[in-house]
Amino acid sequence: MSEAPKEASANASAIDEANLKEQAAALTHQIEQTAEDKEKRHLLYNQLGAVEAQLGHDLAAIAAYEESLKDKEEFGDAYNALLNLYETQRKAAAKAKNDDDIQKWVNKTDALLDMSKRVMRSGFGY
């Protein structure tokens, strides 16, 4: 009888994952349709980053959040998520003793901090 809750949980997880993958595909399609609307694309990339992060696709989440910030530099979900994701990637690189990857993620963090200085100087993002 203890197997039923595990099976139900596994089925729910599979359904959740399938729903998240559908959301990611739909968001990707919407992004392709909004090439000229940077504000809308910025929001869609934020949503896509969150979905990819929920799926455990850290590199895809990073790519989406970085695109979001290319469209609109601001503090918010993308900025905060990137700080955390970059740190996670840096720690994984350190654990693997991969100096090149450590430097890559440190450089990305530094670039993000530079962006935050630009945002603060411009008075936006508060």
Image (cartoon, rainbow, N blue to C red):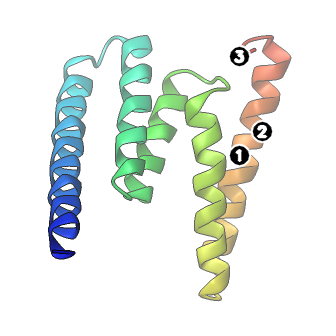
**Label 3, residues with CA under 10 Å away: few <14, some 14-19, many ≥20:** few
Q: How far across and how far down the image is residue 97, in percent?
A: 65, 88
Q: Is residue 126 left or right of residue 38?
A: right
Label 1: which residue? Answer: 111
The kind of residue tagged 2 is Asp
Q: Give the camera-side residue of 65 and 32.
A: 65
Q: CA distance from mark 2 to mark 1?
A: 5 Å
C-alpha gap between disc 3 and disc 2: 14 Å
Q: Residue furthest bottom?
A: 97
For the residue pair 3 and 73, the one nearer the viewer reads as 3
Q: Secondary structure at mark 2?
A: helix
Lateral position of residue 118 relative to residue 79, left or right: right
Q: Are marks 3 and 2 in contact (CB under 8 Å)?
A: no
Tag 2 near tag 1, CB within 8 Å: yes
Q: Is residue 85 visible?
A: yes
Which residue is at a point 59% across and 87% down the rendered structure image? 96
**Marker disc for residue 125:** 3
Mark 1: amino acid: Ala
**For residue 14, what is the image quadrant?**
bottom left
First in sequence: mark 1 or mark 3?
A: 1
Identify residue type, mark 3. Answer: Gly
In this figure, which residue is indicated by the disc labeled 2? Answer: 114
Please identify, in this view, whether the residue under mark 3 or under mark 2 is nearer the observer.
3
Which residue is at a point 41% across and 40% down the rendered structure image? 49
Residue 77's x, y, as percent? 57, 31
Q: Which residue occupies 44% across, 22% down?
A: 42
Judge left or right: residue 44 versus residue 84. left
Could you say which is closer to the camera, residue 104 or residue 15?
15
Looking at the rendered structure, the number of numbered marks drawn on it comes to: 3
